[in-house]
Image (spheres, rainbow, N blue to C red):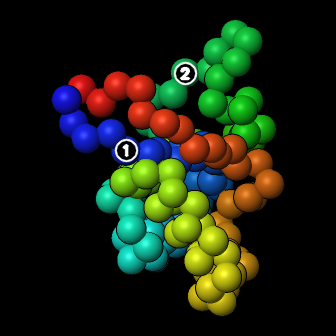
Amino acid sequence: MKKTKYVEGFVLAVPTRNKAKYLKMAKIGAKMFAELGALRLVETWADDVPKGKWTDFYRSVKAKKSESIVFAWVEWPSRQVRNAAMKKMMADPQHKDMFKDMPFDGKRMIFGGFSMLLDA
């Protein structure tokens, strides 16, 4: 068994034409998260995401036909480290500047923190 960690997960719709802009922002974010104690950041771009009959990733973020789904997560050593990092990040002017011109609609992003149940 691996060491238990805390995970913060994200699902968002990014205009497909903004993939390069999103990746650039994600790389900046990864560096920032690492400086604040994150163990790992993973960003994934949909390539086999089915549309469901009742629910799916697309509906969860009200994705448009011109948008792609991003599924991402940040691994933290603990919830406490994540909470302290988020507090610092929100107070950092660089963070505010970075998210001023996001390449996606942040209002449709869903996110949350998760305690590890299984890490096999």
Given residues 68 and 5, the one toward you in this image is 5
Q: Residues within 10 Å of mark 2 (few under 14, many from 20)?
A: few
Given residues 114 and 105, the one toward you in this image is 114
Instruction: Determine the residue positioned at 63% across, 53% down.
Output: 14
Q: Which quadrant of the figure has residue 60? A: top right
Which residue carries the number 1 mark? 5
Question: Which element carries disc 1, helix, strand or loop?
Answer: loop
Relative to 74, 101 lies left or right: right
Amino acid type, callout 1: Lys
- Relative to residue 15, is residue 18 depicted above or below? below
* Image x and y of residue 59, in percent: 73, 30
Q: Residue furthest top?
A: 53
Instruction: Determine the residue positioned at 65% across, 55% down.
Output: 15
Quadrant (top left, top right, bottom left, bottom right) of the C terminus: top left
- The tag on residue 55 is none
Query: Of tags 1 and 2, which is closer to the observer?
Result: 1
**Image marks 1 and 2: residues in contact by CB distance under 8 Å:** no
Amino acid type, callout 2: Pro
Q: Residue furthest left?
A: 1
- Relative to residue 81, is residue 42 depicted above or below? above
Q: Which quadrant of the figure has residue 61? A: top right
Which residue carries the number 2 mark? 50
Given residues 39 and 111, the one toward you in this image is 39
Residue 72 in sight in this render:
no
Q: Of label 1 and label 2, which has the lower sequence position?
A: 1
Given residues 75 and 96, the one toward you in this image is 75
Instruction: Determine the residue positioned at 25% across, 41% down.
Output: 3
Q: Residue furthest front?
A: 80
Between the C-alphas of marks 1 and 2, the distance is: 29 Å
Question: Which element carries disc 2, helix, strand or loop?
Answer: loop
